[in-house]
Image (cartoon, grey):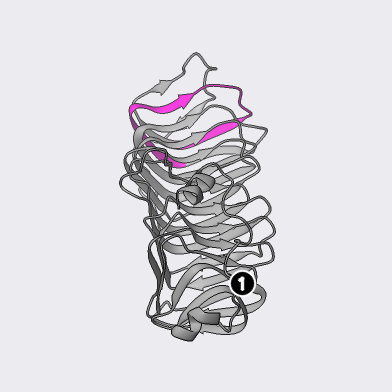
């Protein structure tokens, strides 16, 4: 378990296929003792009913399709990990299904794999959902990812769509642990409630693309709630950010669009470098106990229009900000719709 945690935190993540039991869907000795236990590689069609147990590393092979039943509670042994090289589905919005374990690796969608999950709760995983390079476009809706160090990880070239989801990170971290969602591919999220506690929120890495709408990202004395480091594009709309060092933090990134957001943090928005764009900030509210705008670095053209602010700008020796067209009162609909 310690090795698993270290690999995850170093960005090595979990191996594509664990060196685990050689049992197949007939279950070997494990399933012979418990018909609801699953271990090793699974083949063919399977339904996980209430009481299903994942033992060790479980891989849904390329030729397998697994359905999680309505209301099913799936448990697993500590240190288990679920890999999806085939298809994992659930239609459980009417009665949530759960995968709940004391502490486990989480759900990893491998190259060629597909996860289409509606109404599922994932608890206590080191990762919530990880979409590996080459994974099919996956979906997670009407569910929850609870107490996960990395609720979402999207690798280069992969895409994950998240709709109406609650995500929480641990309130306290063990020594050496870090917590944040990593986006290297494409994450499209709407109606997301993300509690970062005192950690980072969503970090968009080089080449990453984030489209976030109608969402709330919050923390308690947290770090940056949405940060972009070399991102391809960041689009934030009709969302709120509060309780952190920076609500929004832009390092050199190709393009950003911020529309109808409210950011209440020590620094409402930090812009330390932007590309050719388009780069726009409009119809938004920014408050900061230190500054509403922390501006530095080299930036392409930025349009600030209809922006309500409290406090001033912090320049840090950087360039003078472009013309800022300010609103005379808070933008009332700069929040989730």
Residue at coordinates 50% horizontally, 48% vertically from top-left?
3
State which quadrant residue 268 falls in. top left
Q: Which residues are magenta?
A: 283-306
Q: Residue furthest front?
A: 29
- Front position in the image: 227 or 180: 180
Q: Residue 185: where, in percent of width, then height?
A: 63, 51
* Residue that mark 1 sits on: 22
Q: Residue 193: where, in percent of width, then height?
A: 38, 56
Residue at coordinates 37% horizontally, 38% vertically from top-left?
175
Q: Residue 98: where, in percent of width, then height?
A: 40, 72
Q: Relative to residue 69, is residue 183 drawn left or right?
A: right
Q: Residue 332: where, in percent of width, then height?
A: 35, 48
Q: Measured along the vertical axis of the image, is residue 231 above or below residue 46?
A: above
Q: Is residue 148 visible?
A: yes
Q: Measured along the vertical axis of the image, is residue 197 above or below residue 107?
A: above
Q: Is residue 91 magenta?
A: no
- Front position in the image: 65 or 211: 65
Q: Residue furthest top?
A: 317
Q: How many marks?
A: 1
Q: Secondary structure at mark 1?
A: loop
State which quadrant residue 115 falls in. bottom right
Image quarter in which the C terminus is found: bottom left
- Front position in the image: 34 or 164: 34
Q: Is residue 258 visible?
A: no
Q: Is residue 284 magenta?
A: yes
Q: Relative to residue 78, is residue 321 drawn left or right?
A: right
Q: Measured along the vertical axis of the image, is residue 305 above or below residue 3?
A: above
Mark 1 neighbour density, 10 Å: few (under 14) some (14–19) many (20 or more): few
Q: Main secondary structure of the magenta part?
A: strand
Q: Measured along the vertical axis of the image, is residue 76 above or below residue 262?
A: below
């Amino acid at each position: 378990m310690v090795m698993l945690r270290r690999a995850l935190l170093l960005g090595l993540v979990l191996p594509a296929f664990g060196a685990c039991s050689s049992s197949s869907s007939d279950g070997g000795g494990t399933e012979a003792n418990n018909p609801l236990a699953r271990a090793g590689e699974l083949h063919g069609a399977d339904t996980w009913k209430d009481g299903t147990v994942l033992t060790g590393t479980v891989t849904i092979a390329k030729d397998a399709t697994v359905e999680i039943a309505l209301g099913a509670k799936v448990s697993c042994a500590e240190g288990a990990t679920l890999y999806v090289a085939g298809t994992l589905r659930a239609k459980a919005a009417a009665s949530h299904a759960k995968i709940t374990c004391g502490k486990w690796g989480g759900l990893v969608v491998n190259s060629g794999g597909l996860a289409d999950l509606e109404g599922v709760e994932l608890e206590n995983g080191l990762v919530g959902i990880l979409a590996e390079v080459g994974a099919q476009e996956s979906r997670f809706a009407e569910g929850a990812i609870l107490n996960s160090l990395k609720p979402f990880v999207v690798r280069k070239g992969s895409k994950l769509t998240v709709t109406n989801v609650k995500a929480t990170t641990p309130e306290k971290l063990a020594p050496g642990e870090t917590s944040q969602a990593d986006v290297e591919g494409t994450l499209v999220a709407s109606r997301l409630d993300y509690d970062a506690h005192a950690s980072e929120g969503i970090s968009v890495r080089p080449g990453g693309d984030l489209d976030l709408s109608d969402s709330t990202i919050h923390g308690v004395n947290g770090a940056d709630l949405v940060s972009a480091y070399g991102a391809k594009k960041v689009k934030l709309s009709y969302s709120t950010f509060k309780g952190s060092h920076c609500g929004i933090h832009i390092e050199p990134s190709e393009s950003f669009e911020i529309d109808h957001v409210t950011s209440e943090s020590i620094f409402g928005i930090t812009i330390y470098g932007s590309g050719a764009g388009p780069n726009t900030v409009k119809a938004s509210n920014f408050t900061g106990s230190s500054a509403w705008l922390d501006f530095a670095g080299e930036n392409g053209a930025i349009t600030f229009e209809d922006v309500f602010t409290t406090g001033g700008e912090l320049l840090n020796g950087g360039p003078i900000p472009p013309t800022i067209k300010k609103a005379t009162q808070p933008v009332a609909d700069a929040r989730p719709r």
